[in-house]
Amino acid sequence: MVRVAYFGPAGTFSEEALLTQSDLAAGERTPFAAVPEVIAAVERGQADGGVVPIENMIEGSVSVTLDTLAFDSDLLIQREIDLPVSLNLCARPGVALADVRTVVSFPHAIAQCRGWMAKKIPNAEPRASHSTSDAAREVSRSKRTDLAAICNALAAEIYGLDVLASEIEDHPENQTRFVLVGRGVPAPTGHDKTSIVCFQRADRPGSLLSILQEFAARAINLTKLESRPTKRGLGDYCFFMDCEGHIADEVVADTLRNLAAKQAEVKFLGSYPVGGPAEVGVARRRAAGRAWKHASDWVESIRVQIRETE
């Protein structure tokens, strides 16, 4: 049986994402209070894998996940899970929308509902919690009649809350991306993504361009580029990058080889199956792969003509 740690407590979107994966849902699930604790549990061998949020389409990356994987862990991403996110305002039975004066939730969730809150409950004060589910649990245990939580329907059901308003996120079709972290590199599927962190060897004009040109020269599509502080000094940044393809693809391997040799210190975060439709990415990578093989065969046809030293 697979043992899976996840960002809890019970009823979080992380658990909801986990439950969409049949192999993970059939396993033994253990919640942890913070993202670093989930990752640490996998490193200690308490779990075979861990599910944590990494990106929201409205609020962007979950920095604690990126930083923990980049600076504090050697675990690798095993797969990504894209989950449609619907947020609800929930409270104890008997509490009306007009009664709400404090709204508690995970900061990313509050940020996704700013517009709705400004229109519907302008006098309510937002307050951060460790997770959306933790917010629901706090509201269920509180005796206050002016307290509400932003959470999902699963958390509301678990903690016995009424839904005062549903789908309160400011942008429709909201999605959050989660990743399963663990050990090793999954086999290529043909619809994969590779994640790395690049640390510049020198802060000089054109250094980022030199890094990007390694991908452009091989027709590899970058799907993410984000700078984050290295924690080594003020103004010192590294670059989180996602590209289409798998480390098993020679064109991707050659790109990372050249990056590490000539341009930057590189940390490999994983090659893993992509969530979502595959058609466009697969066709693009197959074309790039064919072009790379043709070029490689051409170079080899020349190199075999090299005479041995007499």
Image (cartoon, helix red, strand yellow):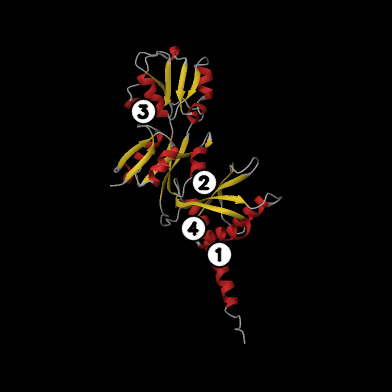
Alpha carbons under labels 4 and 3: distance apart:
38 Å
Confirm whether residue 183 shows in the render. Answer: yes
Helix, strand or loop status at disc 2: helix
Q: Which marked residue is nearer to the observer: mark 2 or mark 1?
A: 2
Tag 1 or tag 3, which sits nearer the N-term?
3
Residue 155, which numbered label?
A: 3
Q: Residues within 10 Å of mark 4 (few under 14, many from 20)?
A: many
Which percent across, then down, holds residue 162?
A: 36, 20
Taking 152 as reference, is 306 above or below it? below
Helix, strand or loop status at disc 1: helix
Alpha carbons under labels 4 and 1: distance apart:
14 Å
Which residue: 44% across, 56% down? 190
* Residue designated by label 1: 292
As drawn, which residue projects farthest toward the bottom? 310
Which percent across, then down, holds residue 200?
A: 63, 51
Pointer 3 with pointer 1, Cβ within 8 A: no
Tag 4 or tag 2, which sits nearer the N-term?
2
* Residue designated by label 2: 70
User: Which amino acid type is marked by label 1?
Assistant: Trp
Residue 32 placement, left or right of 259: left
Q: Which marked residue is nearer to the observer: mark 4 or mark 1?
A: 4
Which percent across, then down, holds residue 193?
A: 49, 51
Pointer 3 with pointer 2, Cβ within 8 A: no
As drawn, which residue projects farthest toward the right? 205
Image quarter (top left, top right, bottom left or bottom right) of the C terminus: bottom right
Tag 1 or tag 2, which sits nearer the N-term?
2
* Residue designated by label 4: 247
